[in-house]
Image (tube, helix red, strand yellow):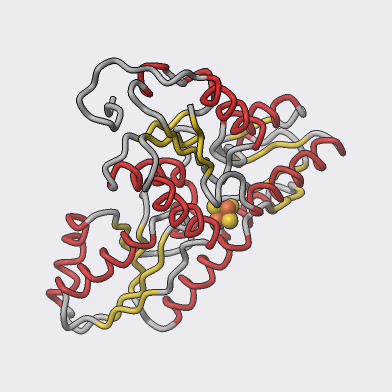
């Protein structure tokens, strides 16, 4: 099978720095990571092997040193950890911090904060964690949450940011939908989608064009990996999200000649190269499909 690599793929600087910081701290002594350092099972296993333990909540931390993850945390949580007497280390990606600062600036302008992202994602929880009121939207139907506020105050000022790993096109579409639904509101968007996410999504569009199918290597909880697969499917290409080579299935590639390969920002390179070798060894298999493009599972 011919394998085409995306121009931009795999681990970003934010995840790499977080992994390096965590491994360094784990070598120095007992360490607790508050949540998954990043959403990749291979990285999480590496942290476990290095002796770092994980805790879901500050109350469960049993070591002196605690590490905040690349996804960022609300200031309130950091303060609570310090008040517990813990030594707090921070692996928050600077581009997540940039999103926090953008949101703070919009609130300081007197705007009602609107976050485009997944309500339960740890990055979004961190973004809104210090706010008294906010609105989280992910699709057009979520805009109705703002109906009563805007009915009371049609000229309200709204400040929009996005989870750093959202597709920029969706952010622009949702902001346009917000403006269309509330034409008298004063809507200000600060683009907080991070550059590595933009690079990988742009590269995915080029990759999908000219590939019979696409494989995205990334953890099932990795938002940016899932979004990469969605971009390919939106372009009519079968796209398979796998955590590692063991999840690949030969029948996905029946009648395929060229497979595009990319990976999310938390995927380590050895995992990507395993998948690449698996695909390269796979013979082209004709099963008599009438279409040149292999079947979507
Ligand atoms: S995906 Fe973007 S925001 Fe997240 S760690 Fe990587 S560079 Fe930072």
- Left or right of 48? Residue 225 is left
Q: Position of residue 208 (x, y in %)?
A: 38, 45
Displayed quadrant of residue 174? bottom left
Residue found at the very far left of the displayed protein: 151
Residue 261 position in % (x across, y down): 49, 38
Number of marks in the image?
0
Q: Is residue 116 above or below residue 102?
A: above
User: Which quarter holds ligand 1?
Assistant: bottom right
Q: Quadrant of the C terminus?
A: top left
| Quadrant of residue 213 within the rendered picture | top left
Q: Residue furthest right?
A: 28
Residue 227 visible somewhere in the drawing:
yes
Residue under the image location 76 percent in, 27 percent down: 51
Residue 1, percent from left and from top: 48, 26
Query: In the picture provided, is 248 more to the left or to the right than 231?
Result: right
Point out residue 147 in the picture as x, y percentages from the top left corner. Answer: 15, 67
Q: Is residue 107 above or below residue 278?
A: below
The one of 194 and 238 positioned closer to us in this rendering: 238
Taking the image as shown, residue 238 lies to the left or right of residue 15, namely left
Answer whether residue 218 is visible to the viewer in this image: no
Residue at (49% x, 73% y) in the render: 102
Q: Residue placed at 49% from the left, 19% from the top? A: 282
Q: Nearer the viewer, residue 192 or 240?
A: 240
Q: Camera-side residue: 69 or 292? A: 292
């Amino acid at each position: 099978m011919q394998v085409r690599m995306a121009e931009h793929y795999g681990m970003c600087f934010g995840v790499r720095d977080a992994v390096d910081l965590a491994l360094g701290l784990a070598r120095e002594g007992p360490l607790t990571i508050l949540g998954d350092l990043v959403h990749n099972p291979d990285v999480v296993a590496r942290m476990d092997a290095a002796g770092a333990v994980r805790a879901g909540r500050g109350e469960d931390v049993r070591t002196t040193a605690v590490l905040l993850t690349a996804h960022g945390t609300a200031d309130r949580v950091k303060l609570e950890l310090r008040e517990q007497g813990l030594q707090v280390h921070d692996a928050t990606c600077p581009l997540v911090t940039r999103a926090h600062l953008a949101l703070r600036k919009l609130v300081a302008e007197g705007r009602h904060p609107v976050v485009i992202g997944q309500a339960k994602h740890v990055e979004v929880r961190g973004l809104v964690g210090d706010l008294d009121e906010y609105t989280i939207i992910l699709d057009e139907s979520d805009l109705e949450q703002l109906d009563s506020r805007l009915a009371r105050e049609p000229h309200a000022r709204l400040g929009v940011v996005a989870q750093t790993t959202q597709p920029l096109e969706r952010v622009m579409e949702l902001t346009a939908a917000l403006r269309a639904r509330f034409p008298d509101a004063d809507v200000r968007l600060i683009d907080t989608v991070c550059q590595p996410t933009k690079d990988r999504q742009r590269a995915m569009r080029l990759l999908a064009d000219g590939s019979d199918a696409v494989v995205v290597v990334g953890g099932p909880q990795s938002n940016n990996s899932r979004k990469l697969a969605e971009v390919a499917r939106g372009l009519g290409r079968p796209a398979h999200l796998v955590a590692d080579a063991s999840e690949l299935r030969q029948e996905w590639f029946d009648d395929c000649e060229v497979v595009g390969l990319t990976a999310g920002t938390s995927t380590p390179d050895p995992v990507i190269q395993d998948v690449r070798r698996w695909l390269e060894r796979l013979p082209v298999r004709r099963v008599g499909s009438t279409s040149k493009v292999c079947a979507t599972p």
